Image: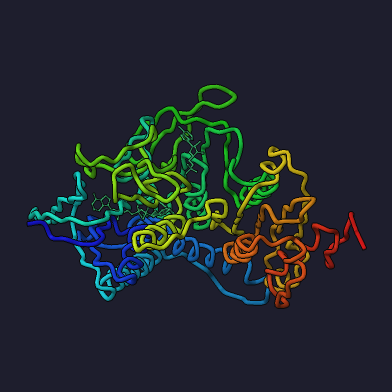
Amino acid sequence: MAKKFDVIVIGAGPAGYHAAIRAAQLGLNTAIVEKWLNAEGKPAYGGTCLNVGCIPSKALLEASHKFVDARDHYADIGVMVDSVTADVPKMIARKEEVVGNLTKGVAGLLKTNGVAMFEGMAKLHAGRQVAFTAHDGSTEDLEADNVIIATGSVPVEIPPSPLTDELIVDSTGALAFQAIPARLGVIGAGIIGLELGSVWSRLGSDVVLLEALENFLPPADRQVSKEAAKLYKKQGMDIRLGTRVTGTEVNGDEVTVMYTDANGDQSETFDKIIVAVGRRPYTEGLLGADSGVDLDERGFIFVDETCLTGAPGVWAVGDVVRGPMLAHKGMEEGIMVAERIAGQLPSVNYDLVPSVIYTHPEIAWVGKTEEQVKADGDEYQVGTFPMAASGRAMANNDTAGFCKVVADKTTDRILGVHIVGNHASEMIAEAVIAMEFEASAEDLGLTMFAHPTLSEGLHEAALAVSGHAIHVANRKRKK
Ligand code: FAD
Ligand code: AMP
């Protein structure tokens, strides 16, 4: 006899554990199946994000940023330190500690919410039957009125650069280096490549990013990607666009990368290579032939706008379905589906998913880029404010970047906000809230911001849309 639940969630990454906790809060008898084993072979919750993604990368970004700040910038503000050195094994150990605490915390949350936890592999069959295989090989049949698939994604591997144990690694390997590679090649200058490249560049590696595309950061506003390219270059990262990796050759403890660029065939030798060419949806071993769940042509589980698959009562959320592969997008989908199962009618606003690059300065945006608004044929106005004119940024000795607000020319409604600067990841939330409430640039301008804060940069950019910014020379001043 199958064990019966109201809801079974497959995968306990951000999308799955949010779905499970919300379903349990709503009084649904909920189970979650998770197969992750950590480096010590122990079951771990939290998926990619907590174990090998968002959290460990931010722990290393913060540690490496503090190192550079102490070494290069403390003296500017009168804090004199004799010598600053990086203890990489300690940084990695602290990162592991943060990951351990958080993954255990998620397990604790699931438990205290009364979610039944199954550690092992789930396979979905027709009629929402789930075959569960525990890590010790024992099996159990589970069944539910609703199943939520949240099996996430894994790094893409490309034939020219097959992973090796030590020399050619993916993002997971790059979060665990025990020493600083002198020469580091990163294949792919997307968000993950830039963040990991930044970590090791700050710690002392000579970093070269090899990017096949001619454009840098295509999803970002042009003004943002131009500024970012300038700042990363100044920090010492060598970003080579129009550079397609065609092969790799391991020789002892170094790797030669073959690539083509505008000058033809080239090669360069590195001590380590990080392959950061994107992620793909993960459904290996998940779907029985009779599951009734379809994949699209790129391998994502096919869902409608409410995350329902073609199989009755089977939903899918997070990286395994269309849309940006971001933890917060999956979390909101997980919550939406749990509430829909409980009879509520929430939806996810896919137009307002914020994007963040956690380099220094941080880069964050929400809504449309200026180029997208232009391409839509809409008339618009732009307000920008340089962080160099922010009192708080000056006091912080950290004035790189700007805030930019794009607003509809007729209605003044905010269409997009783009920020380059320290704490952009926090500031973008203000823009998301404003846009969720369909604010105009004037609404944001009429809102009182605490002084002195970096957020005032956003306030000033909103005022600048109509030429009212106080701390910059306004070219289009209006009464
Ligand atoms: P996942 O987190 O991938 O979780 C899926 C879970 O399902 C896994 O635990 C897996 O073991 C389990 N599973 C799969 N199949 C089965 C099965 N058949 N049975 C049982 N269990 C199964 N996103 C951000 O928003 N911000 C960031 O700063 C950020 N930084 C990142 C940095 C790096 C280096 C990487 C790699 C990713 C980063 N991401 C970031 C992306 C983020 O990690 C993902 O978007 C997020 O983890 C997706 O959540 P998910 O729940 O859909 O899937
Ligand atoms: P993202 O999908 O944002 O993580 O970025 C991955 C990046 O890797 C994309 O910008 C791709 O263009 C890039 N990429 C993919 N394959 C190659 C390759 N063979 N050589 C160089 N860059 C690549």
In the image, 8: left or right of 321? left
Question: What's the coloring here?
Answer: rainbow
Placement of the C terminus among the 4 image quadrants: bottom right
Residue 278 image offset from top left, x and y in percent: 43, 42
> Which residue occupies the foreground of this view, 178 or 324?
324
Q: Is residue 226 visible?
A: yes
Q: Is residue 37 visible?
A: no
Residue 352 image offset from top left, x and y in percent: 57, 55
- The answer to whether 277 is drawn above or below residue 141 in the figure is above
Q: Which residue sits at x=70%, y=69%?
A: 393
> Which residue occupies the foreground of this view, 374 or 421?
374
Q: Quadrant of residue 102?
A: bottom left
In the image, 276: left or right of 471? left
Q: Which residue sits at x=50%, y=30%?
A: 244
Placement of the N terminus among the 4 image quadrants: bottom left
- Outermost residue, right direction? 479
In the image, 359: left or right of 186? right
In the image, 81: left or right of 25? right
- The answer to whether 57 is drawn above or below residue 449 in the figure is above
Q: Which residue sits at x=47%, y=42%?
A: 186
- The answer to whether 91 is drawn above or below residue 192 in the figure is below
Q: Quadrant of residue 402?
A: bottom right
